[in-house]
Structures are given as structure tokens and as C-alpha cells.
Image: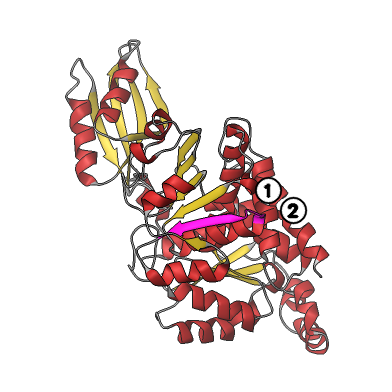
């Protein structure tokens, strides 16, 4: 799911009196800005300085936020506006680092020549020992052609590099996996598959990232068929895992039996189709979907789902509705049925605001702000690499979703993405299922 595009740190000075921070927060919200972190930088006898992170949809909204704060008067002033996101990315977010300290000739001989030749011969005789004596078994290629970068679309692989670096950083932080960004200067499925197959000996797994629909389906299917290492397209299956986890939590909250419910998916792109397949794998008997693209509806039918002709029919038929269209306000309050579970996951503006859905009678409603793929992919790959699995199955993905849901506290949709326990539990659940299949 895409995020708000403009993030700035606004240094605000206020008189040191109760209520002024509330006035600033209200001003930001009045023009649609979303507040992230608030850090108190300095408290003086007369004034207080706070660094407020603000998320906006565009530059125009950012200017409106600044004007709203400046317009409060009463000694409240904007001191600086800075782009901390750009600063954080200077020089990139990742680098390759040696695990060994090389300080002597003895170290050099062990790490490189002449000692390394002995290791090469061991692997030549028993190739499977590369998992023991090299980093291959703990390294994942993060592959993109740049055709579907976040909510920005086809901006090219180089412009997508910050996203790939982010994935690599998250792999390292939550799963101890080395993620290596691979930028492909081609959109041709044949060339993508050929290139990934050619470089695959250096990796224990392949994470496909931000590859557009419909060629993402062909690329993933062919690589799964032709490689003997795990392959996963995160925009499809990572999103689907976290969505299933969120729906499991929502159904528990609303008292709905998910496997007996009728599930509807609005939008059958890469994420939407994968979500449908995930629910079918979980055991949901009836999964409906709608999309303007007839080929997408045919793909749903081929996977075992039931395409419908209109959004209105889906809303009348389904107990649980998930929407990933990117169209704000698509679902009207009058379409909501009493007790429905509604997950309008498009960011920054959902298909229906949760409060409007609840007011119209929904039993549970949420938007996509907390549905973050980082809850899934690090632990999924940690689990399959630990097990030495050659592929990622829907059984493993369902186990990952259940693990995420089981880490979710009452009243929440999914757990906090920075909770290390979640990633450990996902890895454990996937490894257990993967181990049974070996």
C-alpha cells in the first residue's frame, strides 16, 4: 500500500503555556495533515521548541499546514521546515560489510589466498555445502524492474532503489538476512526471467518487488517453476498475508466466522488477486471479486474465485469486503450492510472512511494505514531459509498470517511492525510448515 508522499519536520516555537501544542495539532489536522512524531527539543521559561513530523499528500497541503500554524498567532511560530527523509537517504541506507576482522597475514591467508582454495574445492565436490561455507544460504535478491514503485507507478528501477534499500535494511533488522537490490533495465518478462535465472546461483531466495501487473504474474510463475530456490512477489503475497492476518483479527473482534463468511475483493490487480487466493487457501468457501478488467476476472475464476459484475452486487452479497483500488470514496455509505466487515486498504485515502462505514452499520471497519508488508516478508524468508525449502507455498503463507494474527492484541488490527516477537513467530510458523514438506 502506498504512503503519503510528502513528509517534513516542522520546528514550531510556542509560548510555554498549556494548550498551545493542542492548538498546533488542531491547525495541522484542520487542513488534512497527519502528525507523526513530536519531539520536544527545548523547554525555556517563556517558549518551547518542538520538532513535529507532518505527513501530507502533496506540497500544496504542506504549504497549507505551514500557513495554518503561522496563522494561529499568539506567539506561535514556524522556525524551520526540513526534509529529514531525504537527509536519511544520503549515501544510501545499506552497505556490504565483512564479518571478519582482517588484521594479520594469517587472517588474510584464511580469508583469501591461499586458504580459500581449500573451501572452493570442498564446494566443488559437494555443492550443497555452499550453504554452510558461503553467504548464499542467507542472501536474498530483491529484484525490481521499476514498473510499480509504491503508489508512484512506472518510475524506473533506479528511482525505485530507495525502496529496495529499505527492504534490504528491514531484512537485516528483523531477520538477519542479507538483502541485495537488483535493478533490471528491462520490462520484458522473458528477459527478466532469463536474468534472474542467470544470477540465481548467488542467492538463497528471490524477492520480486514493485513489478507491475499483469507481467508480474508470468514472471513469478515462471521463476517458481524454473528455479529450485524460494521465490515470492511481495506486492502479491506479502500484502495478502498481512491482509489475511488483519481480517482474522477483524473477524474475532466482530464475532464473524471467517471460513463460513462470504468474502468480497474490490480490485483484482496484483494484490487483489493474491488476497483472493490467500482466502481460498485459508479455507474460505466463497470468494467474490470485481474489477473493470475482464482478464483479471478470468484469472480470479481460474484460481477458484467467483467474479461478479458490479460493486453493488458484491456489497449486497459479501459479509467481508476488502478493497485495494486506489479510488477514494468508491464505496458509498448506502452500500454498507448491517454487520459487514469493511477493510478499505487504499492509501492515503481509503475507498470509504472507517468512521463513515461504522456509522452506516458496519460491524468493523478499518483503512490501510496499519497493513504493512514488513510484518510478513522478513519472517517468511527467514523461515524458508532456515528450513532449506525450495519454494514458498500457500500453506506457509497462511501459517505466517495466523502467526501475525496471534500476535495481535485485542482491539488492534495487526501488531506493531517493529515488534521483534512478530518476526520470530512468523519465521517459526513458516519453518515448521516448510519442514513438514521436506
Q: Which residues are magenta?
A: 282-290
Q: Find residue 157 and report its horizontal and vertical position in percent.
A: 39, 71
Q: Quadrant of residue 349?
A: top left
Residue 402 marker: 1
Does residue 146 appear in this view? no
Tell us which disc is closer to us: 2 or 1: 1
Q: Which of the two residues, 66 or 254, is positioned nearer the viewer here?
A: 254
Q: Quadrant of residue 37?
A: top left
- The answer to whether residue 311 is above or below residue 393 is above
Counting labels gives 2
Q: Circles 2 and 1: CB distance less than 8 Å?
A: yes
User: How would you rate the neighbour count of disc 1 (Cα within 10 Å): few for under 14, some for 14-19, many for 20 or more?
Assistant: many
Q: Which of the two residues, 374 or 69, is positioned nearer the viewer here?
A: 374
Horizontally, is 313 left or right of 226 in the view?
A: left
Residue in view at x 62 percent, y 53 percent: 284
Horizontally, is 152 left or right of 68 in the view?
A: right
Q: Find residue 26 and report its horizontal and vertical position in percent.
A: 29, 23
Q: Which residue is mark 2?
A: 429
Q: CA distance from mark 2 to mark 1?
A: 9 Å
Q: Find residue 318 and report its horizontal and vertical position in percent.
A: 49, 47
Badge 1 marks a residue whose secondary structure is helix
Where is the C terminus found, in terms of image quarters?
bottom right
- The answer to whether residue 118 is above or below residue 293 is below
Q: Find residue 115 and report its horizontal and vertical position in percent.
A: 78, 81
Amino acid at each position: 500500500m502506498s504512503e503519503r508522499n510528502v513528509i517534513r519536520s516542522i520546528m514550531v516555537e510556542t509560548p510555554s503555556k498549556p494548550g498551545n501544542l493542542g492548538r498546533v495539532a488542531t491547525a495541522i489536522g484542520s487542513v488534512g495533515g497527519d502528525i507523526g512524531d513530536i519531539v520536544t527539543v527545548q523547554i525555556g521559561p517563556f517558549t518551547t521548541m518542538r520538532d513535529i513530523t507532518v505527513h501530507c499528500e502533496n506540497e500544496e497541503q504542506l504549504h497549507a499546514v505551514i500557513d495554518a500554524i503561522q496563522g494561529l498567532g499568539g506567539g506561535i511560530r514556524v522556525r524551520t521546515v526540513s526534509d529529514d527523509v531525504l537527509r536519511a537517504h544520503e549515501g544510501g541506507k545499506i552497505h556490504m560489510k565483512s564479518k571478519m576482522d582482517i588484521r594479520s597475514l594469517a587472517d588474510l591467508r584464511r580469508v583469501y589466498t591461499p586458504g580459500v582454495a581449500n573451501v572452493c574445492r570442498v564446494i566443488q565436490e559437494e555443492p550443497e555445502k555452499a550453504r554452510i561455507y558461503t553467504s548464499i544460504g542467507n542472501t536474498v535478491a530483491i529484484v525490481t524492474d521499476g514498473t510499480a514503485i509504491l503508489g508512484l507507478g512506472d518510475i524506473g528501477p533506479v528511482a525505485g532503489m530507495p525502496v529496495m534499500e529499505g527492504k534490504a535494511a528491514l531484512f537485516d533488522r528483523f531477520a538477519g538476512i542479507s538483502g541485495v537490490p537488483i535493478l533490471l533495465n528491462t520490462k520484458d518478462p522473458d528477459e527478466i526471467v532469463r536474468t534472474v535465472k542467470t544470477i540465481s546461483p548467488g542467492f538463497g531466495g528471490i524477492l520480486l518487488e514493485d513489478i507491475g501487473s499483469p507481467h508480474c504474474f508470468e514472471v513469478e510463475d515462471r521463476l517458481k517453476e524454473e528455479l529450485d530456490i524460494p521465490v515470492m512477489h511481495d506486492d502479491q503475497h506479502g500484502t495478502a498475508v498481512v491482509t489475511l492476518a488483519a481480517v482474522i483479527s477483524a473477524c474475532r473482534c466482530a464475532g464473524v466466522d471467517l471460513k463460513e463468511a462470504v468474502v468480497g475483493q474490490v480490485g483484482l490487480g496484483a494484490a487483489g488477486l493474491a488476497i483472493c487466493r490467500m482466502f481460498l487457501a485459508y479455507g474460505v468457501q466463497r470468494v467474490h471479486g470485481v474489477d473493470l478488467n475482464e482478464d483479471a476476472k478470468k484469472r480470479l475464476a481460474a484460481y477458484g474465485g467467483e467474479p461478479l459484475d458490479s460493486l453493488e452486487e458484491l456489497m449486497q452479497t459479501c459479509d467481508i469486503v476488502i478493497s485495494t483500488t486506489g479510488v477514494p470514496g468508491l464505496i458509498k455509505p448506502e452500500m454498507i450492510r448491517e454487520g459487514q466487515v469493511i477493510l478499505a486498504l487504499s492509501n492515503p485515502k481509503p475507498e470509504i472512511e472507517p468512521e463513515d462505514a461504522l456509522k452506516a452499520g458496519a460491524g468493523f471497519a478499518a483503512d490501510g494505514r496499519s497493513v504493512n508488508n514488513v510484518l510478513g516478508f522478513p519472517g517468511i524468508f527467514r523461515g524458508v531459509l532456515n528450513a532449506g525449502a525450495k519454494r514458498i507455498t500457500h500453506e506457509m503463507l497462511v501459517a505466517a498470517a495466523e502467526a501475525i494474527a496471534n500476535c495481535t492484541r485485542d482491539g488492534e488490527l495487526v501488531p506493531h511492525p517493529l515488534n521483534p516477537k512478530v518476526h520470530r513467530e512468523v519465521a517459526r510458523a513458516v519453518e515448521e510448515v516448510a519442514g513438514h514438506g521436506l
